Image: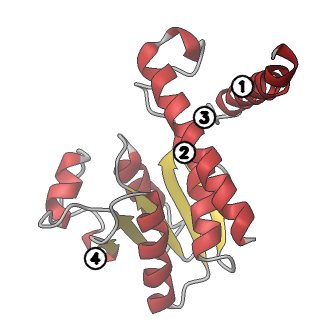
Amino acid sequence: MARVLLPPVFLAGLALLGWFGGLIWFAQTIPREEGWADRATDAIVVLTGGSERVSTGVQLLAKGLGHTLFVSGVHQGVELREVLRAAKLDPDTLECCIVLGYEAGDTVGNAAETAAWMASRDYHSLRLVTSNYHMRRSLLEFDMAMPRVDVVPHPVAPDAVKLRDWWRWPGTLALIVNEYNKYLFTLARHSLLS
């Protein structure tokens, strides 16, 4: 009986060890600083759901790093002035060049909504603004939705996410484990579609 159970137990142990090693790699390689490359793109795309994302997107637009700022995943009925006020920005700030997307409810939806918007504008490059822990999965989703679009990642480092000694902070630990599991699922989908 022990010989029959050994291979499944051994395989389960290897799988757990692999998952744990991957989690450590995932957490340790999350960008610790805001922003990459100052190269301009056709659009700046902000994914809602995290602090400081919209204000970062508006700052990048003000610097001239994109023609238009697209905010994906805005709740129905929320208007631009409300979004800007919530981000502690002057509601008149670059209002002419900001577009809100209301269709997305998750990261898969963000990628699909952005792909449709990019195609409608005939844009071929974008700067993606999202939280640093969310960037790796977002890039996979965007690659699946629009493989021919050049995406420049621009991770935002939220103050509430404690990446130094991340395992000691229960909120950060739970966030990273959850995001890592979602990343693995997205990676599996990406591998099947590639």
The amino acid marked with disc number 3 is Glu
Q: Which residue is mark 3?
A: 33
Label 2 close to label 3 by CB (< 8 Å)? no
| The quadrant where residue 145 appears | bottom right
Q: Residue at x 56, y 63 (%)?
A: 127
Q: Is residue 40 visible?
A: no
The extreme front residue here reads: 1
Residue sitting nearer the eye, 71 or 189: 189
Residue plotted at (65% across, 49% down): 36
Q: What x and y, as percent, mark residue 159?
A: 43, 26
**Distance between mark 1 and mark 2 Cα atoms:** 16 Å
Indicate which label's residue lies in the foreground, 2 or 3: 2
Q: Which residue is mark 2?
A: 182
Question: Which residue is more in the foreground, 132 or 2?
Answer: 2
* C-alpha separation, residue under disc 2 versus residue under disc 3: 22 Å
Type of amino acid under label 4: Cys
Quarter of the rendering containing residue 62: bottom left
164 is higher (above) or lower (below) than 109: above
Secondary element type, mark 2: helix
Task: Pick the residue in front: 64 or 162.
Answer: 162
> Disc 1 or 3, which lies upstream in sequence?
1
Q: Is residue 160 above or below residue 145?
A: above
Left or right, 109 with reference to 180: left
Tell me the number on the disc at residue 96: 4
Structural distance between the alpha carbons of marks 1 and 4:
51 Å
> SS of the residue at dot 3?
loop
How far apart marks 4 and 3 lie (CA) works out to 29 Å
Q: How many marks?
A: 4
Q: Which residue is found at the position 56% from the left and 17% from the top?
A: 166
Residue 16: give its label.
1
Q: Amino acid at mark 2?
A: Lys
